[in-house]
Amino acid sequence: MKLAVAGKGGVGKTTLVALLGEYLARRGQEVWLVDADTALCLGSALGLAPEDTPAPLIANSELIRQRVGSDGFISLNPKVDDLPEKLRARAGGMNLLVMGSIAGAGGGCACAANAMVKSLLAHLVEERGQWVIVDLEAGVEHLGRGTVQFVDGLAVVSEPSLRGLSVAAQIAGLARDLGLARQALVLNRAEPGCVPPRLDGLPPLAATLPRLPSLEARQLVSASALDLPERELIDPACRAILQAIAVGKEIPEP
């Protein structure tokens, strides 16, 4: 199963990717997390030090030149099947691939870097049977067929604010226009029972995550979102999100 996570900047999108991955990994699932955000924060959310986090693929000019080509002769289908194991980092029982922003991939851009990133993402989500979760760039401008054509569903994250929810509705609407109809809304840092306003295009609410005191307490000393003690709050939310998107697939029990 392959899903993408999107939302306005600062709403907890990357944290949710880490929590979903950890939920699955703790239940014996093979999980690949893909950092496709220019902010490149997923490694730190998994507890990796900067020196242990892979450099973004999109900046690896030598590898891109070897596989894709240069000087006007570009292969749009480079060999990538050997790259995931070579480029990954392991964290919390999960596999991390750092791609960098895939903005423009599939939207008419023929540059070598985007061709490489698009091909590797396609390999991960089309030819492998594991769980793949893609942390997308914040906002709506980056969405294109090169992003959504490879995933089964989209989790849209927002805080309980009109600004965040308006961006969530825009993201969901654009993704739906591009053919990605399976979507779920996640309210982060919200009080129990919070009901979002009705906005055109906003996906159905799948789960609400409250503020997590342990996560807030550690943010000045650690960026990691793993091994939080509030499992009784996190696990049911993760399962509900996966159930809303992964229709027909068995979700591991909490």
Image (cartoon, rainbow, N blue to C red):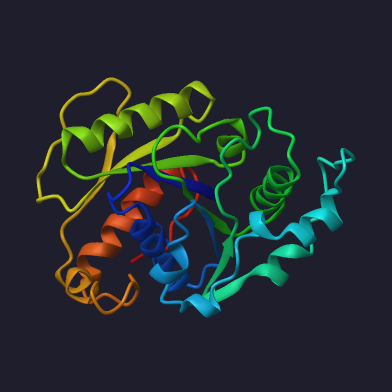
Q: Quadrant of residue 45?
A: bottom left
How far across and how far down the image is residue 57, in percent? Answer: 65, 59
Q: Is residue 236 above or below residue 249?
A: below
How many numbered callouts?
0
User: Which residue is pictured at 86% across the width and 57% down the height?
Assistant: 66
Which residue is at a point 72% across and 51% down the rendered structure image? Answer: 127
Q: Quadrant of residue 147?
A: top right
| Left or right of 25, for residue 59 | right
Regarding residue 79, the answer to whether it shows in the image is no
Instruction: Classify 155 as above or below 225.
Output: above
Foreground: 171 or 138?
138
Query: Outermost residue toward the front?
Result: 71
Which one is in front, 40 or 134?
A: 40
Please state the horizontal and vertical placement of residue 59, each as a whole percent of the image.
65, 57
Q: Is residue 88 visible?
A: yes
Image location (x, y in percent) of residue 238: 33, 57
Seen from the viewer's position, the closer of residues 50 and 146 is 50
Q: Residue at x 82, y 43 (%)?
A: 77
> For the C terminus, which image quadrant?
bottom left
Identify the residue at horizontal 27%, vertical 59% (top origin). Answer: 236
x%, y% of residue 240?
32, 51
Give the answer, above or below, for where 33 lies relative to 160: below
